[in-house]
Amino acid sequence: MSASLPLPPTDLVRNGRAQDGRYAGLMSRLDWSGLQTAQAKGRLWQRLHHKRWQYVGIGSQDVFVGLAIVSLGWCQTAFAYVFDRRRRQVLVDWSADGLPGLNGAVSDAPVVGSHAWFKSLGSSLSIRHEPDGGLHVKVQAGGIYLQASLALDGAPPFLLAVGPIAHGASHATQKSPGLAVKGWLEVAGQRHELDNAVGCLDSSNGLLARDTSWRWACAHGQGVGFNLQDGYFGDCENALWLDGALIPLGRAVFDFDPHQPLKPWRVCTDDGLLDLTFRPEGARQADRDLWVAASHYVQPVGTFHGVVRAAPGAHGRQVEGLLGVTEDHRSRW
């Protein structure tokens, strides 16, 4: 059950306007075709600014796997990486670019019925919702071989967040709670069983500004998890999952040294419901500048420690060693 959030609307756009808000549950399709502000800017603007992505994170005692398939409208891109928690190093960091439709695509169905895929020479990624009710993830790229299924049945409610973006545009995202995983990973000559791992999904779809930046944190474990963002989407997607309840959170504050991202971070919300210290174990990071597009980011992997609360004044739940990521990201796309 959720703490206070309504069910998602039937349609993302009604009478030309986005149905802004935070909701508990799944939406069948993220469709911006009737949005008046987008129609006024024309089809070319919509094509260039329409961004879709599917991100999956899978964490265990030994490894953390992150992968994403991204449609930029004019370009398709994907990445996958494996972080070895015991060695505290990135074992493989693979990425590739391609053409929409030819090398990949991301569907407007965010979860149920969703399919995101990417293919390039000798590499393939797929995130697909299958009839058995699970999200099936497959990766064969850069020496990463992954087959995993994330269970949706019996999971706490997903968050649906819909909200305005600069210049009259809009964005929507479905964020998952912690999802049980079954499967395996082979990398660097070792096989890792993932049946005790926890996974999460970020399925996003919006009409974003050319220059977009954000700070992000996400972590999930047994009975507790959260998603936080500070940047282009305000506090729209800030949420806490606690013992099956989905609880909206206030504005997120990220206190860290961007020049030394492997030092501890403090992450909290202005409503007092979340106050955590993040201890990085290592990071994936890169700077790409292709003139027409650029991406500057660091995504540390590590553990969160501190206190979360279901409501102001409620008894605090201690959080110790909750595996997750933070991110500092700037994009020109």
Image: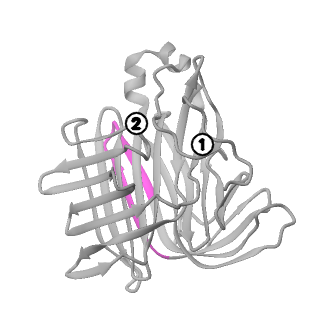
Colouring scheme applied when the structure was drawn: one colour
SS label for mark 1: strand
Q: Amino acid at mark 1?
A: Ala
**Magenta residue span:** 281-297
Quarter occupied by residue 195: bottom left
Quarter occupied by residue 184: bottom left
Furthest-bottom residue in this view: 86
In percent of the image, x 42 and y 24: which residue is there?
46
- Left or right: 319, with 271 as reference point: left
In percent of the image, x 37 and y 85: which residue is there?
87
Count of numbered tags: 2
| Location of residue 84 in the rendering, given as x and y in whole percent from the top left corner | 36, 79
> Predominant secondary structure in magenta?
strand
Say which of 163 and 153 sits in front: 153
In percent of the image, x 52 and y 61: which residue is there?
154
In percent of the image, x 64 and y 43: which residue is there?
23
Q: Quadrant of the C terminus?
A: top left
- Left or right: 188, with 171 as reference point: left
Q: Amino acid at mark 2?
A: Asp
Instruction: Identify the residue position indicated by label 1 in the image.
Output: 161
